[in-house]
Amino acid sequence: QKVVLATGNAGKVRELASLLNDFGLDVVAQTELNVESVEETGLTFVENAILKARHAAKVTGLPAIADDSGLAVDVLGGAPGIYSARYAGVDASDQQNLEKLLVALKDVPDDQRQAQFHCVLVYMRHAADPTPLVCHGSWPGVITRESAGNGGFGYDPIFFVPDAGKTAAELSREEKIAVSHRGQALKLLLEALR
Ligand code: ITT
């Protein structure tokens, strides 16, 4: 079954595509099908994931999977949250977003730096699917004071995982997906699709 992966984020494609293929889907990234990114006007991860999946399904005529995700920092009241990709501006790089977060938390003591990653994965059979599959995963951690590690993407270098004793960017791809927000959402999605 051919499915479009409705994301322009190469980090998400790296973490999701091969596992979806192993499951038996024939995953094509939206960039390969010239699907443009859609404006994320929703106010929740769920709404934005549905917007992205619906758009890709409409343009390609294929079933679509979308990932909307972000980092919620407790002391910031859950920010940047759904705005994680645009935290330092509309065209901000991962590095700029991460640096802005370190500055925002500059005076926050070590015991108040808890955060959670969230990931919502949506599967839509077609653009008008009235019952999309919606799966959520979350992952707790602590925001560090400086970057460590080269793996992963986004905020991974400053997301310390207490159980692992290192940042998400210091985990291998396999180690990260086994415990991450995305890995948990993916597990639920594959169970629902089975
Ligand atoms: P698409 O909408 O095309 O999928 P995007 O990068 O715009 O790509 P989002 O709107 O879902 O995706 O934004 C996700 C943000 O959360 C982005 O800043 C990521 O860097 C960050 N993020 C999500 N999952 C992450 C992870 O596993 N590790 C580090 N950062 C992550």
Image (cartoon, rainbow, N blue to C red):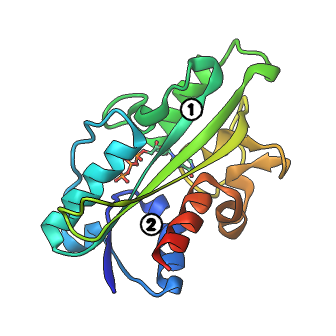
The numbered disc on residue 13 is: 2
**CA gap, disc 1 to disc 2?**
22 Å
Nearer to us: label 1 or label 2: 1
Using a 10 Å C-alpha cutoff, classify the residue at mark 1 as few (fewer than 14 neighbours), some (14 to 19) or many (20 or more): many
Q: Is residue 103 left or right of residue 176?
A: left
Residue annotated with mark 1: 72
Earlier sequence position, callout 1 versus callout 2:
2
Q: Quadrant of residue 178?
A: bottom right
Residue drawn at (49%, 70%) of the image: 192
Mark 1 element type: strand
Provide residue 185's location: percent of width, then percent of height. Answer: 55, 59
Residue drawn at (60%, 57%) of the image: 152
Residue drawn at (39%, 37%) of the image: 44
Provide residue 3's location: percent of width, then percent of height. Answer: 32, 77
Residue drawn at (82%, 43%) of the image: 162
Say which amino acid is labelled 2: Val
- Above or below — where is 130 with respect to 105? below
Say which amino acid is labelled 1: Ala
User: Residue extending furthest top?
Assistant: 107
Provide residue 165's location: percent of width, then percent of height. Answer: 85, 48
- Above or below — where is 188 with respect to 167? below
